[in-house]
Amino acid sequence: MTLVKSQIGRRAFIKNTSLAGGGLVLGFNFFNSCKPKVAEALAVEIEMPNEWFEINGYLKIGDNGVVTIMSPNPEIGQNVRTSMPMILADELEVDWKNVVVEQAALNTSLYSWQVAGGSRSISSSWQNLRMAGATARQMLKLAAAKIWQVPASEILAVAGVLSHEASGKTAGYGEMASEASQMVVPEEVELKNKSEFSIIGTSRKNVDGKNIVTGKPLFGIDVQREGMLIANLVHPPAFGMKLKSFDAEVVKKMPGIREVFSLKLYDEDFDRAAFHHTAFNEVVAVVGDSTWQVMQAKKALKVEWEKAGDTVVGMTLFGNEMKVNHPAGMENSDIHKTKLEELNSQKGKVARRDGNPELAFKNAAKIIESSYSCPFLAHNTMEPMNFFANVTEDHAELLGPTQTPEWMEPAVAERLGLPLEKIDIQMTRQGGGFGRRLYGHFMVEAAVISQKMKKPIKLVYSREDDMSQGMYRPSYFATYRAGLDKENNLIAFHVKAGGIPESPLFANRFPAGAIDNYLAEDFTVDSNITTGAFRAPRSNFIAGAEQSFLDEVAEEMGKDPIEFRLELFKRAAENPVGENNDYDAERYAGVLELVREKSNWKQSESGVYRGVSAYFCHQSYVAQVLDIVLENNKPVVQKVTAAIDCGIVVNPDAAANLSEGGIVDGIGHAMYSGLTFKDGTPEQKNFDRYRLIRHSEAPKSIETYFVQNDIDPTGMGEPPFPPIMGALANALYKATGQRHYHQPFISQKTIKG
Amino acid sequence: MANFNLKINGKIQEIDVDPTTPMLWVLRDHLKLVGTKYGCGIAQCGACTIHLGDDAVRSCQLPVSSVGEQEITTIEGLSENGDHPVQKAWLEVDVYQCGYCQAGQIMNASAFLKKTPNPTEAEIDTAMNGNICRCGTYTRIKKAIKTAAQTENI
């Protein structure tokens, strides 16, 4: 066992005892239920105890041995509500059958990183969750030691049962829970050896499964409350426009309509963080009794818009101050393209230079050059943005889907004029996130509307609102060049990458470190179209571009694409160029070797066209092989084989599900999706014109293999997404004879159905 | 406003709403049956799928006034204990990620399997193509449909 200081468990315990009645840890209560909670009881179908004993901020134990584990992080479909409690349960040594999971409310004194972002949920809480479980296990042992009058060190805890061999005494956790909750928190606790894990590393089904398949109210949009009103917003029809005036006379008289008013989200001097940002600071709210009535009124509302001027928004991102320029004007996609191409033809800002790339290119016998691009994307979570708010004079209750409750809390407090401790934010299960719900302006909007109405309200965006409201994946552009000498050696590499409004470049990622002469440059174009993080930001384009280009280089060199990459990794591992290389070449090579073996790469079948890709992001390594067959001369993705190194895999089948989802998502967006603009207006506002991948277009099968190691867990939600776009492009080339450089690939003639 | 007596999940429900109100919002706002989900409002995503008689329909495009005597089944009424073969298959395969679209997927799949108890891959693709899953659980949905198809009394 590993001895570790238990400060974290101790802090959680001490803070918890100071809470009045534990009310704050009860969290998720929008069904107005009493114990046992309807949702949780249905989910697990186990008998609830008569009394709960709180051991620390992460768990309480019932007198019958049932354990409630708090899941602190937002659940957006990445399975944290199952996987995070599994970590704690393993250290606690409890039978998973006796575990009930509850969503924790935002509580910055108890939990850290209550954020669904950066694929960091598991890795950032790994130690805390283990500690919380191990601390509770030790306190149960101490309680038994006191009652049985035996040394705690002689007591075993296995699957919820404490036993002392010499005296023959045994007791369930429930019997000791009361005493354990009174114990002084130990200074040190023992963590299990990783080889002793019995829950971590085993597949456990989603704790919300039964509730999902029976349609229980789990999501923010499902929240109901006595006297609750429905609110919709009307925002400018185009980026570059703002509210001029509106006439609510007719609409206010429509059935069920309570109020129509404009609201300004933030004052100019508001200390805005990047996650508070909104495209449209002033909007019109329509509030009424039911959704359909409000939607009808919204359509009938007369609003005048006017052109907005240049604006500069000051904001902070993780403590760094920045200015975001939103130039005036109504933007168009064809002009975006021209601007990107123009800047790409000029010298960029140098982000990294190794050796003498200019000289090496000058001396090169052959230069390969290709450019890649991708459009803006809307996140399109299936559950549109929404939030419930009930703001009274001295309290704000906020309930709904947010990836960043902690970061939004100060914005809500300031806007409402209430102190932080009067803001109570709770999270529902979320119908997708993908980065969109990192930007929680809709939570502030809901709070402002409720404050004005003096009533509980639920703000709901229509799909059109959701898709035309900004925070999109930026549009990117990149040009790659590779120089080969007379002996066909790769001697120089150059990437120049830019975007609107940010560059996708990661200058220190592969193949930096593997090539003597290397140059990375970037550039940016300002825009008034707001953008934000979208599953694996920047990687979600640059991975596919880089991996497509390497395929082209390998072909030019006459090398097998996997063999070629492995040679580069060998170089980077044995004799790296430069010191600041942001990857582990051996683990990178490891996933490529695994995918080569599992996909039978060397035994290709006739009629199957294969592409390979590998990428590192969020501290994890993913390699994928994608197989295409031609049906009626049309490329069809037959199979994808994936190899992943994300350290210890907490819940393997759930992780495989994320791998499958990332692959389908990546194929879909690279192949079909894109958001284009005409005079500042998105040309796609719903799923009739915005193409998302559908059933028949998904791979027929996906196999995922994990590298077995005992490295602490790293990211899993995002890493499978970026590389598949490269594997797809490379397989499409084999199948159609044409390289695919510009997403969405469907716009290229060769794959039109 | 007008009065309607609707047969929903085996019960008669009386409501007084604007006759143009889509069944989606009647279910969600007025009857608090929120398992049926809003996704697009234009019958392009399938999240709002319910059964009208034996047919899977998009409730966002079904005005309450057009329902009449026809029986409506929602995800809440698909089975009494969440043990319809399709629900059981979904649990066995552990299909979902965020879970938001799955009620619509299940309602579509259950109506489809009732008419096509032994579907081919191509038939599944065609039948399910109107239901979007943004998380990309399509391969699992297909696996669950095949699993359900193998159970008796589907």
Image: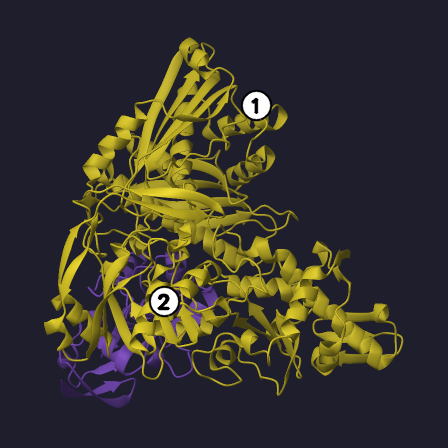
Chain colours: A yellow, B purple
Q: Which residue: 76% across, 69% down? A: A138
Distance in Å between CA atoms under marks 1 and 2: 49 Å
Q: Which residue: 29% across, 29% down? A: A737
Query: Which residue in the structure is indicated by mark 2?
Result: B102
Local crowd size for mark 1, using a 10 Å CA cut-off: few (<14), some (14–19), many (≥20)? many
User: Dot 2 falls on which chain?
Assistant: B
Is residue A25 depicted above or below A612 in this figure?
A: below
Is residue A593 depicted above or below A405 in this figure?
A: above
Q: Position of residue A102 (x, y in %)?
A: 53, 72
Left or right? Give the position of A642 relative to A52. left
Local crowd size for mark 2, using a 10 Å CA cut-off: few (<14), some (14–19), many (≥20)? many
Quadrant location of the C terminus of chain B in the rendered image: bottom left
Q: Where is residue A618 in the image (x, y as percent from the top left)?
A: 51, 45
Left or right? Give the position of A153 relative to A105. right
Mark 1 or 2, closer to the camera: 1
Q: Answer yes or no: is residue A628 visible.
A: yes
Q: Which residue: 46% across, 34% down? A: A506
What is the three-letter code of the residue carrying label 1?
A: Val
Check disc 1 and report its element: helix, strand or loop: loop
What is the three-letter code of the residue carrying label 2?
A: Gln
Q: Where is residue B61 in the image (x, y as percent from the top left)?
A: 18, 70
Quadrant location of the N terminus of chain B in the rendered image: bottom left
Query: Which residue in the structure is indicated by mark 1?
Result: A577
Q: Residue B28 got which mark?
A: none
Q: Where is residue A341 in the image (x, y as percent from the top left)?
A: 27, 28
Which quarter of the figure has residue A742?
top left
Co-location on one chain, circles 1 and 2: no
Check disc 2 and report its element: helix, strand or loop: helix
Foreground of the two, A627 or B45: B45
Is residue A507 depicted above or below A539 in this figure?
A: above
